[in-house]
Image: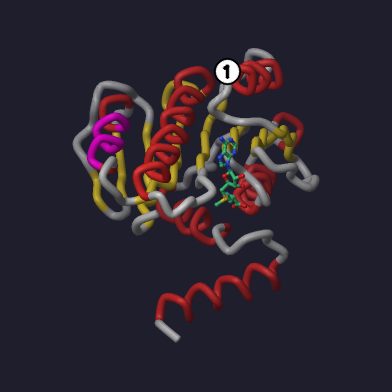
């Protein structure tokens, strides 16, 4: 067994024991430890959220630090998401305008402090197609940021390293004041918002 498989198994077991729906919960917890993403946050929009471990983490951290009455997560996915306390779930395709409009209605004039996007396409094995879909998911997430993320808010996204990576970074960097990729930090850009990109190895 490889070391990385070993590590995945450890997090898989830990997630089961601690009641998280996926081991990716720990990725978000680690990012929050480093960047205090949810400090003073009230509203979180979690894109591509099923089965819901990022929403579980977000909801717990909002409840731990915020005014519970005012705090909530809106979680969207193509697949149905089983109920999570403090989370409003929505089944929809984030690339569709109607889904964004639905989220805007749920927000009812409020802005999100944090937008999370852990989208992953159903991998077909056709590399170019997979990368294209991945790219479309990030573009859709950026559209959400433009419409719902407050000034000064934070965007957290998973992206896969591939042909389009450099272009994706460039797009994100042109929209956010600070962009962190893995452990790398770039110079501030013209917007006041912050983006954290968690880069995964190839699709
Ligand atoms: C890695 S999983 C997300 C895991 C989640 N963050 C968690 O912690 O439980 C990727 C998700 O992206 C969703 N997805 C892919 N394309 C989508 C789209 N166009 N609209 C909404 N969700 C999408 C998939 O249905 C899948 O549930």
141 versus 56 height, above or below: above
Quarter of the render that holds ligand 1: top right
Instruction: Name the one closer to the observer, 200 or 146.
Output: 200
Left/right placement of residue 111 relative to residue 85 reads left
51 to the left or right of 187? right
**17 to 3, vertically: above or below:** above
Quarter of the C terminus within the rendering: bottom left
Residue 33 position within the rendered picture, expressed as x and y whole percent measured from the top left: 46, 56
Q: Residue 171 placed where, x, y %?
A: 29, 29
**Within the magenta stretch, is there residue 169?**
yes
Residue 59 figure quarter: top right
Rendered residue at 60%/21% (across/down)? 100
| Camera-side residue of 164 and 100 | 164
Q: Residue at x 75, y 40 (%)?
A: 86
Q: Name the residue tied to disc 1.
A: 97
Left or right side of 165 for 87: right
Q: Quadrant of residue 92?
A: top right
Residue at (54% x, 48% y) in the render: 122
Residue 186: % across, % down: 21, 40
67 or 109: nearer the viewer: 109
The vertical placement of 25 against 81, above or below, is: below
Per the rendered image, the range of residues in magenta is 166-172
The answer to whether residue 176 is magenta is no
Magenta portion: prevailing SS class: helix
Residue pictured at 45% horizontal, 86% vertical: 1
Single out the residue that lies furthest toward the front: 126
């Amino acid at each position: 067994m490889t070391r990385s498989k070993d590590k995945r198994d450890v997090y898989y077991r830990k997630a089961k024991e601690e009641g998280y729906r996926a081991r990716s919960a720990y990725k978000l917890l680690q990012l929050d430890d480093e960047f205090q993403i949810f400090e003073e946050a009230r509203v979180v929009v979690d894109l591509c959220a099923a089965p819901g471990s990022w929403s579980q983490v977000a909801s717990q951290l909002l409840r731990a630090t915020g005014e519970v009455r005012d705090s909530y997560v809106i979680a969207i996915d193509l697949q149905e998401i089983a109920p999570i306390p403090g989370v409003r779930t929505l089944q929809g395709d984030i690339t569709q305008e109607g889904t964004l409009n639905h989220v805007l209605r749920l927000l009812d004039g409020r802005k999100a402090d944090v937008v999370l996007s852990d989208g992953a396409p159903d991998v077909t094995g056709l590399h170019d197609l997979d990368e294209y879909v991945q790219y479309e998911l990030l573009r859709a997430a950026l559209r959400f940021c433009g419409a719902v993320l407050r000034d000064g808010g934070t965007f957290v996204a998973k992206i896969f390293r591939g042909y389009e990576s450099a272009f994706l970074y460039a797009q994100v960097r042109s929209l956010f004041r600070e962009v962190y990729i893995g452990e790398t930090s770039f110079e501030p850009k013209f917007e006041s918002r912050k983006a954290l990109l968690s880069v995964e190895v190839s699709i």
